[in-house]
Image (tube, grey):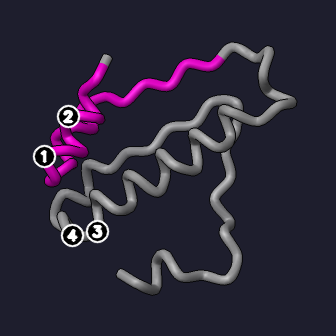
């Protein structure tokens, strides 16, 4: 798992419409939750950029809560 998150450069980019499908990763629960929160962290940083302040943003997580194992994180992911 370390090889996925310890790269010198972060090459994850976001576009005007972005979708992630984590369903195929359900076989890897130890990887799935950290990956989900990494993507959420990066997406939040992109959404908050000053130059995008006036742009409409819709951030939807469909069934993300089922991937979250930690109870505290699960409550956060299910907040409306």
The mark lying in front, picked from 1 and 3, is 1
Q: Quadrant of residue 51?
A: top right
Q: Earlier in the sequence, mark 4 or mark 2?
A: 4
Q: CA distance from mark 2 to mark 3?
A: 19 Å
Q: Which residue is mark 3?
A: 31
Q: Which residue is mark 1?
A: 71
Magenta stretch holds residue 76: yes
Q: Earlier in the sequence, mark 2 or mark 3?
A: 3
Q: Nearer the viewer, residue 44 or 32?
A: 44
Q: CA distance from mark 2 to mark 1?
A: 6 Å
29 lies above or below 67? below
Q: In the visual, does 70 lie left or right of 17?
A: left
Q: Which residue is mark 4?
A: 30
Magenta segment boundaries in residue numbering:
57-79
Q: In the visual, does 70 lie left or right of 15?
A: left
Q: In the visual, does 19 lie left or right of 79?
A: right
Q: Secondary structure at mark 1?
A: helix
As drawn, the residue found furthest toward the right would be: 51
Determine whether label 3 and label 4 are within 8 Å by CB: yes
Q: Residue at x 28, y 60 (%)?
A: 32
The mark lying in front, picked from 2 and 3, is 2
Q: Secondary structure at mark 2?
A: helix
Q: Which residue is mark 2?
A: 75
Q: Nearer the viewer, residue 24 or 71?
A: 71
Estimate how packed mark 2 is, as few (under 14), some (14 to 19) or many (20 or more) residues with alpha carbons within 10 Å.
few
Estimate how packed mark 1 is, as few (under 14), some (14 to 19) or many (20 or more) residues with alpha carbons within 10 Å.
few
Determine whether label 4 and label 1 are within 8 Å by CB: no
Q: Quadrant of residue 14?
A: top right
Q: In the visual, does 80 lie left or right of 37?
A: left
Determine whether label 4 and label 2 are within 8 Å by CB: no
């Amino acid at each position: 798992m370390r090889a996925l998150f310890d790269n010198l450069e972060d090459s994850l980019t976001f576009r005007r419409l972005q979708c992630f499908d984590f369903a195929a990763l359900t076989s890897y629960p130890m990887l799935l939750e950290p990956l989900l929160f990494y993507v959420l962290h990066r997406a939040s940083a992109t959404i908050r950029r000053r130059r995008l302040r006036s742009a409409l943003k819709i951030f939807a997580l469909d069934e993300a809560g089922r991937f979250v194992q930690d109870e505290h994180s699960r409550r956060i992911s299910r907040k409306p």
